[in-house]
Image: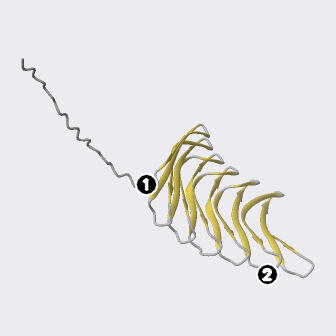
Amino acid sequence: LWKFYNRDKTLLYEYTFKNDIKHGPSSKYYSSNGLIREEANYFYGKKDGDYKSYYSNGQLSAEGAYKDGKKSGAWITYNKSSGEKKSEGSYLSNSKDGIWTSYNTKGSKILQGKYVNGLKDGDWEYYDADGKLIGVKKYVKGSVQLKENLQKTSTKKTTTIKKTTTTKTTGTETK
């Protein structure tokens, strides 16, 4: 275990080494306040296993896992101010893959869609603060193909019937 400090003797890093290569648990700290910044595990020089990062106020920022140095599996990020989920989804070899959902600072869903190999694909749904669907964008390999706004519009169907009166005049001649 190696520990690294700044000039003020504040702990900055803790790494476990094996044969001069990072191997095992590690931690990083903020130099300004000494609070934890990151917790990770290394397997022969590459991040591997559970991972957590923190904001400078100590609030959890993100949690997930690495496999062979790449983000893998389920990941969740959190809002700094509220601590609520900011986004959640999964990675496959360091690329977003599968359904991803984003939330506002109050924890309400504001966006949901699918990634394939790191690119948006399929329908992406957008929600208002009350959780009502307000729009959809269709993506194909990361490019927008179609936008559909679903905002409520007042549509009153008005049918006007025009009444026409026809008067037929017949004239007769008398001799």
Residue contact at pointers 2 and 1, CB within 8 angstroms: no
Labels 2 and 1: the sequence-earlier one: 2
Amino acid on which disc 2 is placed: Asn
Q: Which residue is mark 2?
A: 33
- Residue 27 falls left or right of residue 100: right
| 139 relative position to 27: left or right | left
Under circle 1, the secondary element is: loop
Q: Residue at x 59, y 74 (%)?
A: 83
Q: Quadrant of the N terminus?
A: bottom right
Q: Position of residue 146 (x, y in %)?
A: 54, 40
Estimate the spatial distance between the alpha carbons at disc 2 and disc 1, rounded to whole Å. Answer: 52 Å
Left or right of residue 48: residue 124 = left
x 65%, y 75%: residue: 59
Dot 2: within a 10 Å radius of its alpha carbon, few (fewer than 14), some, or many (20 or more) residues? few
Residue depicted at 9% across the width and 22% down the height:
172
**Circle 1 crowding by C-alpha within 10 Å: few under 14, some 14–19, many from 20:** few
Q: Which residue is mark 1?
A: 153
Residue 57 percent across, percent down from the top left: 71, 78
Camera-side mark, 2 or 1: 1
Is residue 1 something one can see in this rendering? no
The image's mark for residue 11 is: none
Instruction: Compare residues 24 and 63 and report the one nearer the observer.
Output: 63
Residue with the most extreme left position: 175
Say what secondary structure mark 2 lies in: loop
| Residue sitting at x 40%, y 55% | 154
The amino acid beneath tag 1 is Thr
Q: Position of residue 92 (x, y in %)?
A: 60, 46
**Does 155 sit left or right of 51 as displayed?**
left
Query: Along the line of sight, which residue is nearer the eye, 93 or 2?
Result: 93
Instruction: Tell me residue 75's x, y (percent).
Output: 58, 58
Q: Is residue 89 above or below residue 122?
A: below
Q: Nearer the viewer, residue 87 or 1?
A: 87
